[in-house]
Image: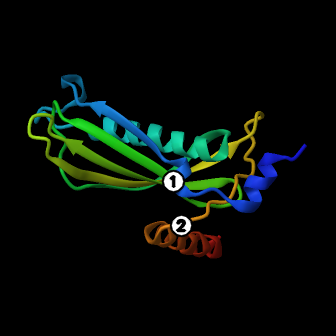
Amino acid sequence: MENTDNKQNQTGITPASTEVNMTQLVLPNDTNLLENLLGGRLLHWVDIVGALAATRHARKTVATVSIESVDFRHPIRKGEMVMLNAKVIWTGRTSMKVAVRVEAENMYTGAIITTNNAFLTYVAMDENGVPCPVPKICPVTDEEVRYYNDAQTEYEKAKGKS
């Protein structure tokens, strides 16, 4: 019987196959005094959708290593629908970098705006809580190749500093 994990490690997985979409409604309890979504609530949702994408890729439990960046381009208002999209864009031996795009939709006008982009790193864990290898990611689109190359460059720079 063929070990499918080894086959995946040899052939790789595309970012699209790791993609996860999550939708949330901004309720009054999610907002600040200006009736905008709390940044902490957004980060919570970003971490969840990112972990789901990383888990889909690794097929293992994952732990958040870092939130490298989150940009806040536009406030998300009470009553808007928040759509989060995450996918794995780079893999190391045990770690995965995930890109998350956040959009808000005004439920009455249908207008959609990109509000945030975030990049997070997760590590796959075995049943004993020890980091374990993950399948490699194989970028396909020009954007995926750019994300992968940028992340690889960052990794090599960080590795050279340690």
Q: Amino acid at mark 2?
A: Val
Q: Earlier in the sequence, mark 2 or mark 1?
A: 1
Quarter holding the C terminus? bottom right
Q: Amino acid at mark 1?
A: Ala
Which residue is drawn at the image coordinates 23% and 30% (left, top)? 26
The picture places residue 72, in percent across and down from the top left corner, at: 25, 53
Question: How dense is the environment of label 1, judged by Cα within 10 Å: few (below 14), some, or many (20 and up)?
Answer: some
Circle 2 sits on which residue? Answer: 140
Which residue is drawn at the image coordinates 62% and 41% (left, top)? 62
Q: Quadrant of residue 46?
A: top left
Secondary structure of the residue carrying tag 1 is helix
- With 89 as the anchor, is 129 left or right in this view? right
Residue 75 makes an appearance in the image:
yes
Residue 76 drawn above or below residue 142: above
Q: Are marks 2 and 1 in contact (CB under 8 Å)?
A: yes
Quarter holding the N terminus? top right
Residue 77 drawn above or below residue 27: below
Q: Quadrant of residue 27?
A: top left
Q: Residue furthest front?
A: 1
- With 106 as the anchor, is 2 left or right in this view? right
Circle 1 sits on which residue? Answer: 16
